């Protein structure tokens, strides 16, 4: 049994003193500390799980030079500020904040710690010590849409999203456009649940989509909950962020896997080398940030071939789903035939394409 | 041996003060044992949750900022609880208070002068009180149980919040993220210490307990609240109006929660989004009981609970236990404090009994 004696109290005082005087003690200076702010639990087996894999990649590649620490379940409100600040106070020299909703909080703390570098995922506000990085998840959505458009019997597809932020809008649009290339009559029913991770809510929304006639549902929220519902109902879906086939071996057609490791290792290396500068990185399939998980054997060979074609096009840089003509929900032409949407347009998009119907 | 509870002739003052302290210590001890049992360094967890926030000076500002809303809400709740009016919907009153403050701020526009802060905060108080007036009215007119109505209105308030921040009040520069625009600089509460996050709301939270203490101990109103709660029949004979007490208890509880919401919004969060309700209104119930429904007790208990919040964050990075661990500790505290209430009114007596009888009893079971 452990008790609180004077010695342990002294240890605590010592630990506290070390924390407040980071860098002055020998062992604290040995390794560079890198911190991670996670939105969900690592056990979401999706978004946060994938970011944690990236963190582990840093440990594996640079474990002798750096040490990583992380915080899970950080809320996307101002309460994130003390958590981010805490990592800086603990001596982290590079801090990854891995969700859109940490944007302003990251900039607030970054202003207080000019010598600490920050990396904010999926945001658009930068500073001298704040980089942003993102991934072209929508490229993966184009592959999923192709499969869904071809395999859906009802032609009604479901999309379970979080918020109407550009990342989600791009995903919905890429998915719908790709599906409509296979089945021009395909429609996408959309539910937004105002959360990135809320398994009961995700499951309920999936039920709603199924009741509306969707026979394939793709998710833009982080838990495998929806896939488990689809598995029970004998329908199909896709994993988000990571291969979730273990949760729904039959229903899981494939998944968009987020591969953050190479980027994280490169940024950590830059920090160690002293070459880190603020940048905006938006990688995709070409750079290996977005990867399509192994296909379910239930996908027919011709559909696999179509999906692989999109994949190869993105890797080669010859394909873009956001090539006109593209019409919005009201039928207004937003992108002219032959034109390709620019990065700035993509990053600020707030309209859905034709065939997307709000189901909530 | 048999354990017998004997009613004390008068409530024990010693136990009144000793049991909250014992509850905190017992929580630490049990927490340590449980964490050790599941393979986590329990001692480190308890040290990080309860001591690091006190020992590491750079954590003090976080404790102060967390404690402020807890103290303010708990002060209001303790008045209601004294009068046996159970308002468990402070979370909703807190949200509505913040929304009312935000509404005034948005209506005033981004160039509004700093003085606008005063109507914003007043709107928060009025909004919170108005939200609590609904259960008060229902209770007085139709005798509807306020436990249910206050809690249910909390969920209604979340819907109001979702509608406003996702609809009419959504930040036009926020790329569709459901949140209000950040408050303009001049409409945020003044910071007390340059370079820290300690805002004016913290000072208000430090002063209010003494004002409440004066009111409760020196005024007729305070006397009325105490009498209505402890001896309702006597109160009726004494001419105290039960309806008036219900109104006062709920309006003050709601008003304080609304004030806390307005201060948290203008001083700390500076924007309202879906994550705004973070549970202060519920945790404040623990604060009120841990503080023995005494204003000064609420001040101390608010700080203790704030420490567990901040410590919970520390323990996340040091021993890798989820943030919700702090919630377990808070719940344990409430459990012990409620369980130990019995010691105030009763004395525990150990009475030796004849072993034969005990055996027989056991055999029968």
Image (spheres, coloured by chain):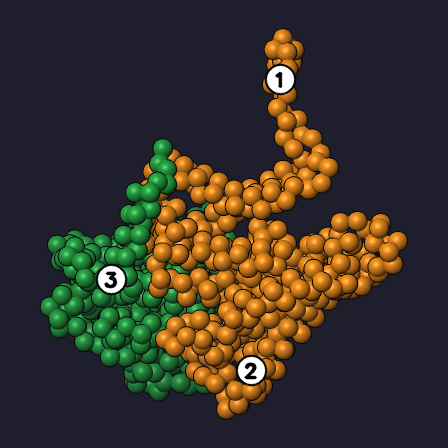
Chain colours: A green, B orange
How many residues crowd around disc 2 within 10 Å: few (fewer than 14), some, or many (20 or more)?
many
Q: Is residue A96 left or right of residue B163?
A: left
Both marks 1 and 3 on one chain: no
In x, y percent, where is residue B164? 57, 75
Residue B105 to residue A84: above or below: below
In x, y percent, where is residue B340? 60, 40
Image quadrant containing the N terminus of chain A: top left
* Residue sitting at x 61%, y 65%: B210
- Residue A350, labelled with which disc? none
Kindly state the secondary structure of the residue where label 3 is placed.
loop
Residue B165 visible? The answer is: yes
The residue where tag 1 is placed is B352
- Residue A21, labelled with which disc? 3
CA–CA distance between discs 2 and 1?
A: 66 Å
CA–CA distance between discs 3 and 2?
A: 38 Å
* Chain containing the residue with disc 3: A
Kindly state the secondary structure of the residue where label 2 is placed.
helix
In x, y percent, where is residue A222? 39, 58
How many residues crowd around disc 3 within 10 Å: few (fewer than 14), some, or many (20 or more)?
some
The residue where tag 2 is placed is B117
Q: Is residue B106 left or right of residue A165?
A: right
How many residues crowd around disc 1 within 10 Å: few (fewer than 14), some, or many (20 or more)?
few
Mark 2 and mark 1 lie on one chain; the one further toward the N terminus is 2
């Amino acid at each position: 049994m452990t008790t609180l004696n004077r010695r342990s109290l002294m240890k605590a005082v010592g630990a506290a003193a070390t924390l407040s005087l980071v860098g002055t003690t020998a062992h604290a200076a040995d390794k560079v500390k890198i911190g991670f702010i996670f939105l969900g639990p690592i056990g979401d087996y999706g978004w946060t799980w994938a970011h944690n894999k990236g963190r582990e990649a840093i440990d594996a590649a640079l474990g002798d030079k750096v040490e990583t620490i992380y915080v899970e379940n950080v809320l996307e409100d101002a309460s994130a500020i003390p958590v981010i600040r805490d990592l800086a106070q603990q001596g982290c020299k590079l801090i990854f904040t891995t969700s859109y909703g940490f944007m302003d909080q990251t900039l607030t703390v970054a202003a207080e710690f000019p010598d600490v570098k920050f990396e904010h995922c999926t945001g658009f506000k930068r500073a001298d010590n704040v980089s942003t990085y993102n991934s072209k998840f929508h490229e993966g959505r184009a592959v999923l849409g192709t499969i869904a458009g071809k395999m859906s019997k009802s032609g009604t597809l479901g999309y379970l999203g979080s918020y109407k932020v550009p990342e989600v809008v791009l995903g919905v649009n890429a998915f719908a456009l790709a599906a409509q290339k296979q089945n021009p009559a395909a429609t996408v029913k959309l539910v937004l649940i105002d959360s990135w991770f809320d398994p009961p809510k995700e499951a309920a929304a999936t039920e709603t989509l199924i009741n509306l006639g969707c026979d394939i549902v793709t998710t833009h929220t982080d838990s495998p909950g929806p896939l488990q519902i689809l598995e029970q109902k004998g329908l199909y879906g896709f994993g988000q962020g990571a291969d979730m086939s273990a949760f729904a071996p039959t229903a899981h057609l494939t998944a968009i896997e987020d591969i953050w490791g190479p980027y994280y290792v490169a940024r950590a290396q830059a920090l160690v080398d002293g070459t880190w500068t603020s940048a905006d990185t938006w990688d995709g399939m070409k750079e290996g940030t977005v990867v399509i998980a192994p296909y379910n054997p239930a996908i027919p060979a011709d559909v696999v071939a179509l999906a692989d074609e999109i994949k190869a096009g993105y890797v080669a840089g010859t394909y873009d789903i956001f090539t006109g003509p593209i019409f919005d929900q009201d039928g207004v032409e937003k992108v002219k035939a032959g034109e390709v949407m620019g990065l700035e347009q993509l990053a600020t998009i707030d309209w859905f394409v034709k065939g997307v119907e709000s189901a909530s | 041996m048999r354990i017998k509870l004997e009613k004390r002739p008068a409530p024990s003052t010693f136990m009144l003060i000793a049991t909250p302290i014992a509850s905190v210590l017992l929580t630490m001890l049990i927490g340590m044992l449980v964490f050790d049992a599941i393979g986590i360094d329990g001692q480190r967890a308890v040290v990080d949750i309860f001591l690091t926030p006190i020992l590491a000076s750079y954590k003090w500002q976080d404790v102060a900022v967390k404690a402020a809303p807890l103290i303010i809400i708990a002060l209001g709740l303790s008045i209601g609880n004294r009068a046996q009016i159970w308002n468990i919907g402070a979370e909703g009153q807190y949200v509505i208070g913040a929304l009312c403050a935000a509404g005034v701020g948005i209506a005033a526009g981004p160039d509004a002068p700093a003085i606008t802060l005063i109507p914003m905060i007043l709107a928060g108080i009025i909004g919170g009180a108005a939200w609590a007036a609904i259960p008060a009215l229902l209770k007085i007119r139709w005798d509807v149980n306020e436990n249910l109505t206050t809690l249910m209105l909390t969920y209604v308030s979340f819907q109001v919040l979702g509608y406003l921040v996702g609809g009419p009040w959504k930040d036009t520069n926020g790329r569709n993220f459901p949140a209000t625009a950040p408050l303009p600089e001049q409409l945020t509460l003044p910071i007390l210490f340059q370079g820290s996050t300690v805002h004016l709301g913290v000072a208000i939270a430090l002063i209010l307990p003494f004002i409440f203490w004066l009111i409760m101990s020196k005024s007729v109103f305070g006397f009325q609240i105490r009498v209505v709660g402890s001896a309702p029949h006597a109160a009726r004979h004494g001419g105290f109006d039960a309806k008036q007490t219900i109104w006062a208890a709920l309006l003050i509880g709601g008003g304080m929660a609304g004030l806390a919401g307005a201060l948290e919004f203008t001083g700390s969060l500076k924007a309202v989004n879906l994550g705004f309700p973070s549970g202060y209104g519920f945790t404040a119930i623990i604060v009120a009981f841990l503080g023995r429904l005494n204003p000064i007790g609420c001040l101390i208990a608010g700080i203790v609970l704030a420490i567990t919040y901040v410590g919970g964050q520390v323990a996340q990075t040091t021993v890798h236990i989820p943030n919700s661990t702090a919630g377990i500790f808070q719940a344990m505290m409430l459990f012990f404090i409620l369980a130990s209430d019995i010691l105030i009114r009763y004395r525990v007596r150990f009475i030796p009994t004849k072993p034969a009888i005990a055996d027989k009893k056991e055999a029968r079971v």
